[in-house]
Amino acid sequence: MGYIRNIIQNKGGVIYSVSPETFVYNALELMYDKNISAVLIIENDKPAGIFTERDYARKVVLKGKSSKETRIHEIMTKDLITVTPGNTIEEAMKIMTSKHIRHLPVVEESKLLGVVSIGDVVKFIIDEQQFIIGNLENYISHT
């Protein structure tokens, strides 16, 4: 099984973020434009939280708040659960499953390197399995 660094290398270093003062509506626009389901909240060049579609549904829609009048800092998830590039894919899957989350910021020495989603993890596993199957088929056909 691979490591978180493998996913980050394949994705590149693109990080979509907003400030805590951003209105929820503007964060949703960014998420729509970039086809992502979470955005990091950056304050003083450090991750301060994360805002996800789940946060929007539970903390804005169900609470009757207005996305054009509510600022991200009011509803973001502040207690970030993170991984490092050295964590295995299996460790990330266990964290996501046990904590019921779909996104993990990747941090090394207090520096934000990216975000790994459950979709990234599944894609990595599928690609890895296809590679192994291809190698096995090649081995079998040449013996």
Image (cartoon, rainbow, N blue to C red):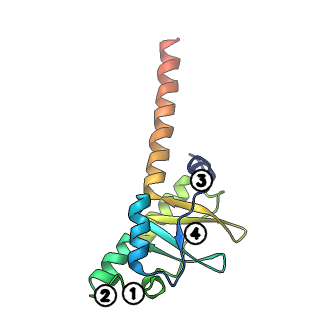
In the rendered image, which quarter contains the N terminus?
Answer: top right
Q: Quadrant of residue 47?
A: bottom right
> Label 2 sits on what residue type?
Lys
Q: Which residue is mark 4?
A: 82
Q: Does residue 110 sit above or below 88 in this rendering?
A: below
Q: CA distance from mark 4 to mark 2?
A: 29 Å
Q: CA distance from mark 1 to mark 4?
A: 26 Å
> Label 4 sits on what residue type?
Thr
What residue is drawn where x is 51% and y is 85%?
A: 21
Which of the two labelled residues, at mark 4 and mark 2, occupies the earlier sequence position? 2
Q: Does residue 132 sit above or below 61 in this rendering?
A: above
What residue is drawn where x is 46% and y is 29%?
A: 133
Dot 2 alpha-carbon crowd within 10 angstroms: few under 14, some 14 to 19, many 20 or more: few
Mark 1 or mark 4: which is in front?
1
Query: Where's residue 35, x and y in %?
Result: 40, 58
Q: Which mark is residue 70?
A: 1
> Label 1 sits on what residue type?
Thr
Which of the two labelled residues, at mark 1 and mark 3, occupies the earlier sequence position? 3
Which of the two labelled residues, at mark 3 and mark 4, occupies the earlier sequence position? 3
Along the line of sight, the residue nearer the viewer: 131 or 55: 55
Q: CA distance from mark 3 to mark 4?
A: 14 Å
Q: Which residue is mark 3?
A: 8
Which of the two labelled residues, at mark 1 and mark 4, occupies the earlier sequence position? 1
Q: CA distance from mark 2 to mark 1?
A: 7 Å
Q: Which residue is mark 2?
A: 65
What residue is drawn where x is 48% and y is 52%?
A: 121
Mark 2 or mark 3: which is in front?
2
Q: Secondary structure at mark 3?
A: helix
> Label 3 sits on what residue type?
Ile
Mark 1 or mark 3: which is in front?
1
Q: Secondary structure at mark 4?
A: loop
